[in-house]
Image (cartoon, grey):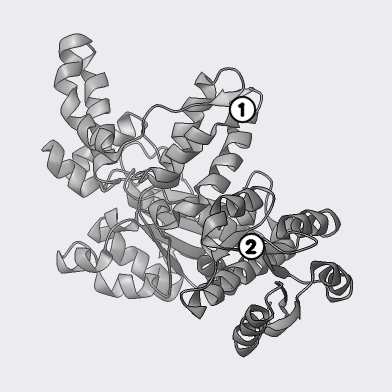
Amino acid sequence: MNKENFRILVVDDEKSLVTLFSRILKKEGYNVKTSTNPETALRIIEDFSPNLIVSDLKMPGMSGLELLRHVKKQAPATDFIILTAYATVENAVDAMKSGAIDYLIKPLKDPEELRLAVGKVMERQSLISSTELWREQLADGLPPVEVVFCGMEEVWKEVQQVAGTDATVLLHGESGTGKSLLAKVMHHLSGRSGGFVELNCAAIPENLIESELFGHERGAFTGAVNSRQGKFELAQDGTIFLDEIGEMPMASQSKLLRILQERSFERVGGTVTLTTNARIIAATNQDLEERIAEKQFREDLYYRLNVFPIKIPPLRKRADTVPVLAKYFVRVISARVGKPVPEITDEAMRQLEAYNWPGNIRELHNVLERAIILSTHGEIRLPPLSTANHEGQARSFKGMVEFEPKRLDELEREAIEATLEKTGGHRRKAAELLGISLRALQYKIKNYKMGK
């Protein structure tokens, strides 16, 4: 959707304000009509079908709230921005509960306030429109596009540009931001006939990762009693997702580089050269350039992987999307655990919106799952959420031992979980804090089945 096709109706009984707003918006390229009378505005709406109405709240004859409710009955997709004076901010909030998408306090301090507010509405409607074109192409079980990319309109644009190509994609993002889900969405939008094959590079022991990637022949090593296809063979005509690529051993990196360059490989212990047309999507929560400087990641491989980089923002950078994500998770989790969908109390929602979410979307999902299981009277209530609580978990194990004796392996698992939480999922930092090697940590994570 471009600006000239985005229709805006400005309604206010102050003619000077209508003229000013119209001038600002037309200069931006929007298609704008105006009215100083809400009754007249209704007739304009019938012919003009605006995408957005910018309306004053207090007007003679019909209030902006009445206009909003009338229009929403006839055209629920039409968005509203309410204008209000300082004394009526509370009424503007009520208007938003009735369906307004935003409000502006007049007089405006800067025309940029109007431009930004309108721009956000157009981006949102563009996302919804493009979503309709893709909706049928998503596989069953994946969240709707408008949920996956909530608050990430720029990321959605990038995904649309690259999904149908063969370009290698590198997803950058903190642990828990949904990199795996994003890769699955890209695969299902790609139209590829093959499957989606996933490998967590940090969860496989170093001596087995090449077998996982490239397969092996019978007798290639102790325990190889049969020949086996690797992930690249299984991903033929499809997509292979290499998660936590920064943890891949250096020896395996050189062989991955060959696949990216030549699209060919041999199974471990084999002599026959195989080819692959699998599309590669890799992901990392680390700074790979920093890993290159540490001599832990090949620079030439980095440039081969970083053909089309996509940065996924952490949840704290798009906190206004928490209500949308929370309501979606509540519906999905309730269906899975077999409970009626509870209501999120106003206080619980305020807690969710105020929290910093160091574990990102994964942590939000886990908090809500626990809350739903414990919910009573059809309501979700939450204990106090605090990042400081997470940072203090690793220090609390001594007290846990004193008051609640546990098996050693249970304590070790809890210590690993708390330390990973503290480091935002960064395994190398977690290993340093725990006083063990990275490989030892990876083995324990796999042994305790502490997946993504």
* Quarter of the figure with the C terminus: top left
Crowding around mark 2 (Cα neighbors within 10 Å: few <14, some 14 to 19, many 20+) is: many
Q: Which amino acid is tagged 1?
A: Pro
Residue 80 — which label?
A: none
Residues at marks 1 and 2, CA–CA distance in whole angstroms: 31 Å
Which residue matches tag 2? 82
- Position in image of residue 442 (x %, y %): 26, 40
Question: Viewer-proximal residue, 129 or 28?
Answer: 28
Crowding around mark 1 (Cα neighbors within 10 Å: few <14, some 14 to 19, many 20+) is: some
Q: How many marks?
A: 2
For this orientation, the residue located farthest to the front is 60
Residue at coordinates 56% horizontally, 69% vertically from top-left? 117
For this orientation, the residue located farthest to the bottom is 27
**For residue 258, above or below residue 342:** below
**For residue 62, above or below residue 90:** below
Q: Secondary structure at mark 1?
A: loop
Residue at coordinates 36% horizontally, 34% vertically from top-left? 385
Q: Secondary structure at mark 2?
A: strand
- Position in image of residue 291 (x %, y %): 21, 63
Residue 150 appears in the picture as rendered: no
Q: Which amino acid is tagged 2?
A: Ile
Question: Viewer-proximal residue, 22 or 228?
Answer: 22
Residue 89 appears in the picture as rendered: yes
Q: In which quarter of the view is residue 327 placed?
A: top right
Which residue matches tag 1? 342
- Position in image of residue 296 (x %, y %): 19, 61
- Position in image of residue 138 (x %, y %): 68, 55
